[in-house]
Amino acid sequence: MAKNFLTPAETAQAFINVGNTKTKMPVGKVLISSFLAGAYIAFAAQLMTTVTHDMAGYFGVGFSSFIGGCVFGIALVLVLVAGSDLFTGNCLLSMGWLNGDLRTSQVLNNWTLVYIGNFIGGLFLVWMMFTSDIWSGHGGQIGGHAVAIAYKKTHLTFWEAFTRGIGCNWLVCLAVVIVAAGQDTMGKIAGAWFPVMAFIASGFEHCIANMFIIPAGLVAKLDPTIAQVVMSNHPTWDLNSLNMYSFFVGNLLPVTLGNIVSGAGLVGGIYWYLYVKGTKEAIPVSQKA
């Protein structure tokens, strides 16, 4: 009976081939594909915010986090099964770089374009949620929850955000590996869902998700009703400290660095070392036709 999955060695080699394809895509296609991924992640983040906005009071923080992870699991299903380019998953291009198939400039160029496209996709969903007036639902409680999530994320220390970024993309890239190994749709869906559920429920940090979550909080807090809801629940908070500086420097920078460390190193680097290194003579890019 034929197996319906790739072995780790076969999966690792597949990533080498995929990396060659991704770095040769036209700029326009890369930006559009990454725009979709940013939007898909943002859809999941908004779903998580809506579903969990009043759960903790009834079921506790732990179960609420678990349910948030369950519904957020749709994010990587959309990205990997429906198809698009996500920065955190593309950290696995490190495998092709380590193997001598990709130049440093190729990897950095792809990461930059995909990061920008993902950001645009996330901000597009912020605009959608703002114009749809969904945040005012339940007396502003949904918007208040969006602000609260953003506030907590921007008040982590640098090292807290960095290490949570490591934990996140370790799991996300393992999900990418499992999906690549799966040879049927349901296997790919399950492979995408479980690790993502785990990273959300654990409280880890994903830079692309935060490109929606924190701007959503920044915009939602401008509504006086929503701001009042937040302050009634958290009277000691200073909402002025939720700003562009705390977004970019306090969260996005350390989380992105943490995501790169785990995606490119703990998954990409280790899988290349275990399953690709030494299996064939790496050919330097400069010597290829």
Image (cartoon, rainbow, N blue to C red):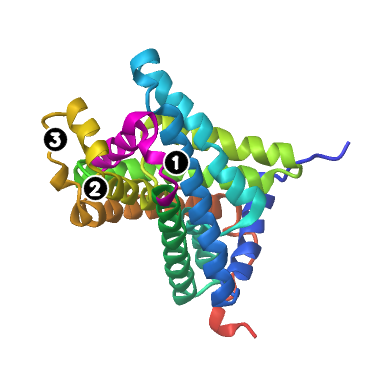
Q: Label 1 sits on what residue type?
A: Gln
For mark 1, what is the residue? Answer: 46
Q: Which residue lies furthest to the top in this view?
A: 58
Which is more N-terminal, label 3 or label 1? 1
> What residue would you read off at disc 3?
237
The quadrant of the rendering that contains the N terminus is top right
Give the main secondary structure of the magenta stretch. Answer: helix
Circle 2 is placed at which residue position?
222
From the top left corner, tell me how far across and down residue 26 is, in percent: 59, 77
User: Which residue sits at x=24%, y=31%?
Assistant: 229
Amino acid on which disc 2 is placed: Leu
**Label 3 Cα neighbours within 10 Å, binned few <14 / some 14-19 / many ≥20:** some
Q: Which of 93 and 101 is in front in this view?
A: 93
Q: Give the range drawn in magenta.
A: 131-153
Question: Is 206 displayed left or right of 278 in the figure?
Answer: left
Local secondary structure at mark 3: loop
| Mark 3 and mark 2: Cα distance apart in space | 15 Å
Does residue 85 lie above or below 234 as drawn?
Answer: below
Q: What element carries label 1?
A: helix
Query: Residue 85: where, in percent of width, then height?
Result: 55, 59
Alpha carbons under labels 1 and 3: distance apart: 23 Å
At 21% across and 47% down in the image, what residue appears?
Answer: 158
